Image (cartoon, rainbow, N blue to C red):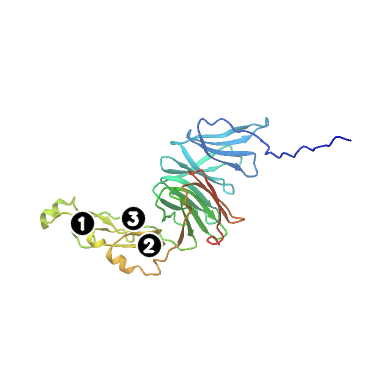
């Protein structure tokens, strides 16, 4: 009887193409340069490096740029070659890479406690999440250089992703919150806070205004600011709270009494939806082709979400 032949099972493994080594600390983020044999990386060692493949087959830095603080994240737009780098010291630095990827020219720097970055190439908007729970929309397109604020989280922003087809922003925070923002809304800039020595509504002095306190024989009051008009007001003249979604405030914030009366129910309508992932999110990835969202958590759990009901 002939011996029975058992064919060997097929083993399919990923093929390692190359290793890019040389960073002196943790590489926090890296991307493949489209249509080029190149990689861009940012690291805890405070460097931004553009690695290009040489004739030897190895990757060597064509750009080695030292930053003033460790690099936490980045966003790269291959069409414009614009690179935005978030630093641990709370700033975003922008660069334009040369066509041959051998030079990196700085453009400008923004202040923000940056923990996450995302880019919209159509509207030319840069989204940054920060440790102070806020998201800033930077108008890189240059219409007016505006910076819009979004407040809808109770903890540090961990990751943000943009759904281009529906113009919705997805943000996740350390407390497990997932917020889907409608970016089709005509939003407004938050007003600058005004300085004053007395309430700009009732003219009562603030506690550092010794002269007016002495003249009117009154104890100074604590200063607050209306989030809608930016005026410096006392607690009595700003006793109300309201949501102002068009200014980015999805939660109730302090407003002066006159502004509270001017806000209509329509203006209080939310521009975002809120969802609880029930785990502490560390990072997210959005797949626009299937409209899936992947969340990975500090609880060692990875969750896949069908976002079709909310991202459409």
Q: Disc 1 or disc 2, which is closer to the eye?
A: 2
Q: Left or right of 30: which side holds 270?
A: left
Q: Are marks 3 and 2 in contact (CB under 8 Å)?
A: no
Residue 13 position within the rendered picture, expressed as x and y whole percent measured from the top left: 69, 38
Q: Nearer the viewer, residue 229 or 173?
A: 173
Look at the numbered disc 2 and give the secondary structure of its residue.
strand
Q: Residue at x 49, y 60 (%)?
A: 183
Q: Residues within 10 Å of mark 3 (few under 14, many from 20)?
A: few
Which residue is under mark 2?
244
In the displayed structure, 119 sits above or below 11; it is below
Disc 3 from disc 1: Cα separation: 17 Å
Tag shown at residue 50: none
Look at the numbered disc 3 and give the secondary structure of its residue.
loop
Residue 268 lies in quadrant: bottom left
- Mark closer to the chain start, 3 or 1: 3
Residue 190 position within the rendered picture, expressed as x and y whole percent measured from the top left: 37, 57
Residue 246 lies in quadrant: bottom left
Which residue is under mark 1?
198
Q: Nearer the viewer, residue 246 or 3?
A: 3
Residue 150 lies in quadrant: bottom left
- Mark closer to the chain start, 1 or 2: 1
């Amino acid at each position: 009887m002939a011996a029975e032949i058992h064919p060997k099972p097929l083993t399919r493994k990923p093929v390692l193409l190359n290793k890019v080594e040389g960073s002196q600390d943790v590489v926090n983020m890296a991307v493949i340069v489209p249509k080029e044999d190149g990689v861009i990386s940012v690291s805890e060692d405070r460097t931004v490096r553009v690695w290009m493949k040489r004739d030897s087959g190895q990757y060597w830095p064509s750009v080695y740029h030292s930053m003033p603080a460790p690099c936490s994240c980045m966003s790269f737009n291959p069409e414009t070659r614009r690179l935005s780098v978030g630093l641990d010291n709370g700033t975003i630095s922008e660069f334009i890479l040369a066509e041959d990827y051998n030079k990196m020219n700085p453009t400008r720097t923004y202040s923000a406690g940056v923990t996450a970055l995302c880019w919209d190439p159509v509207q030319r908007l840069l989204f940054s999440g920060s440790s102070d729970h806020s998201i800033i929309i930077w108008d890189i397109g240059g219409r007016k250089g505006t910076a819009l604020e979004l407040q809808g989280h109770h903890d540090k922003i961990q990751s943000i992703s943009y759904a281009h087809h529906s113009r919705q922003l997805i943000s996740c925070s350390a407390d497990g919150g997932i917020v889907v923002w409608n970016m089709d809304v005509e939003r407004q800039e938050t007003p600058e806070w005004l300085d004053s020595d007395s309430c700009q509504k009732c003219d009562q002095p603030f506690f550092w205004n010794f002269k007016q306190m002495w003249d009117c024989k009154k104890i100074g009051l604590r200063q607050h600011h209306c989030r809608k008009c930016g005026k410096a007001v006392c607690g009595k003249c700003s006793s109300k709270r309201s949501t102002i979604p068009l200014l980015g405030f999805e939660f109730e914030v302090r407003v002066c009494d006159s502004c509270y009366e001017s806000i209509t129910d329509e203006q209080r309508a939310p521009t975002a939806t809120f969802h609880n992932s029930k785990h502490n999110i560390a990072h997210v990835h959005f797949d626009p082709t299937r409209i899936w969202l992947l969340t990975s958590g500090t609880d060692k759990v990875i969750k896949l979400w069908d976002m079709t009901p909310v991202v459409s």
